Image: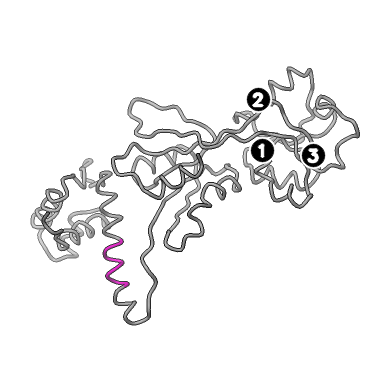
């Protein structure tokens, strides 16, 4: 196999970072046509198109995004070589890019990332946003995986696949002093102030159905769409939270909060959404395998 021409790679890298062929050509002091020829030669060598044109904009293909990751590593390694000889620089790191919806349990995220979080050779990038924004980044090859507790509607143009990676039970969690002695589950729902997820969540739909089955009329103290905020309100001990115990596992371990009662049939499901790629990130396979 012919060796990779690193001049071609450098020209590609310059255009990919700038996002504009004209500016990159000016910065490199070459003509646009010469720059285009060099990139086409690299594409021919790799066997994949690296850019697609959308109007006047050049957008990286999936192969282009992977090539850019490698080019970043190659030219960073060149800089590291100089630094190493001068300053004993650190070894090259690998990269995984993870997106999570803003309301997702931080404890769940930490558990999912634990297999690589302490690996000094791994560069971990975390992004928090809405599910729609994260899926846009996933389809643009800016993320390797999106973590969520809901499956979005998937149309025929979608290029991603959801994997069920965990299913956590849901309980009533709060200060034990708020619970009347000998109270049944229905008594708790009828008498104790409750901190609930908002009606848009799957947990809330299941909770409302359970309350109807029990004939209970819950006393709602607050409705919260953010698990971190729900956790903080539970710690204030003004009410009992409807929450997966993993969200408050530290407080349960120390005794600050107690699992007052399990809620039969209620679970929160967690999904990893990954793109349909021919070139999957091996670190992602490691995370999904550990989660499974």
**Residue at disc 3, secondary structure:** loop
**First of labels 1, 3 by sequence position:** 3
Q: Name the residue under label 2.
A: 206
| Image quadrant in which the N terminus is located | bottom left
Q: Looking at the image, is mark 3 or mark 2 nearer the viewer?
A: 2
The front one of 257 and 114 is 114
The quadrant where residue 179 appears: top right
Relative to 66, residue 181 above or below = above
Q: Looking at the image, is mark 2 or mark 1 nearer the viewer?
A: 1
Q: Residue at x 40, y 39 (%)?
A: 274
Q: Looking at the image, is mark 1 or mark 3 nearer the viewer?
A: 1
Chain part drawn in magenta = 73-80
In the picture, measured across the screen, residue 178 lies left or right of residue 27, that is right
Seen from this angle, which residue lies furthest bottom?
86
Label 3 crowd (10 A; few <14 / some 14-19 / many >=20) = many
In the picture, measured across the screen, residue 111 lies left or right of residue 142, that is right
**First of labels 3, 2 by sequence position:** 2
Q: Name the residue under label 3.
A: 239
Give percent across and percent down for residue 246.
65, 43
Label 2 crowd (10 A; few <14 / some 14-19 / many >=20) = some
Q: Name the residue under label 1.
A: 244
Q: Residue at x 17, y 62 (%)?
A: 6
Q: Residue at x 38, y 75 (%)?
A: 89
In the picture, measured across the screen, residue 226 lies left or right of residue 46, that is right
**First of labels 2, 1 by sequence position:** 2
């Amino acid at each position: 196999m012919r060796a990779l021409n690193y001049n071609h790679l450098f020209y590609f890298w310059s255009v990919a970072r700038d996002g504009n062929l004209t500016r990159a050509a000016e910065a490199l002091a070459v003509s646009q046509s010469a720059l285009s020829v060099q990139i086409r030669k690299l594409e021919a060598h790799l066997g994949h198109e690296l850019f697609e044109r959308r109007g006047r904009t050049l957008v990286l293909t999936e192969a282009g995004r992977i090539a850019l990751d490698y080019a970043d590593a190659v030219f960073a390694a060149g800089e590291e070589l100089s630094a190493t000889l001068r300053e004993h620089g650190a070894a090259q790191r690998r990269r995984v890019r993870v997106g999570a919806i803003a309301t997702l349990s931080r404890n769940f995220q930490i558990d999912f990332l634990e297999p690589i979080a302490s690996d000094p050779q791994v560069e971990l990038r975390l992004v928090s946003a809405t599910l729609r924004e994260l899926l846009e980044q996933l389809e643009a090859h800016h993320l390797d995986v999106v973590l969520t507790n809901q499956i979005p509607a998937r149309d025929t143009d979608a290029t991603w696949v959801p994997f069920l990676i965990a299913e956590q039970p849901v309980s009533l969690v709060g200060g034990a002093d708020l619970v009347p002695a000998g109270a049944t589950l229905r008594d708790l729902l009828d008498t104790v102030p409750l901190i609930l997820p908002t009606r848009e969540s799957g947990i809330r739909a299941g909770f409302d159905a359970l309350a109807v089955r029990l004939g209970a009329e819950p006393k709602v103290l607050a409705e919260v769409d953010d698990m971190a905020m729900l956790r903080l309100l539970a710690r204030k001990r003004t009410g009992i939270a409807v929450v997966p115990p993993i969200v408050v596992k530290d407080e349960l371990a120390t005794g600050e909060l107690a699992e007052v009662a399990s809620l039969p049939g209620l679970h929160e499901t967690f999904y990893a959404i990954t793109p349909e790629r021919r070139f999957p990130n091996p670190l992602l396979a490691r995370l999904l395998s550990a989660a499974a």
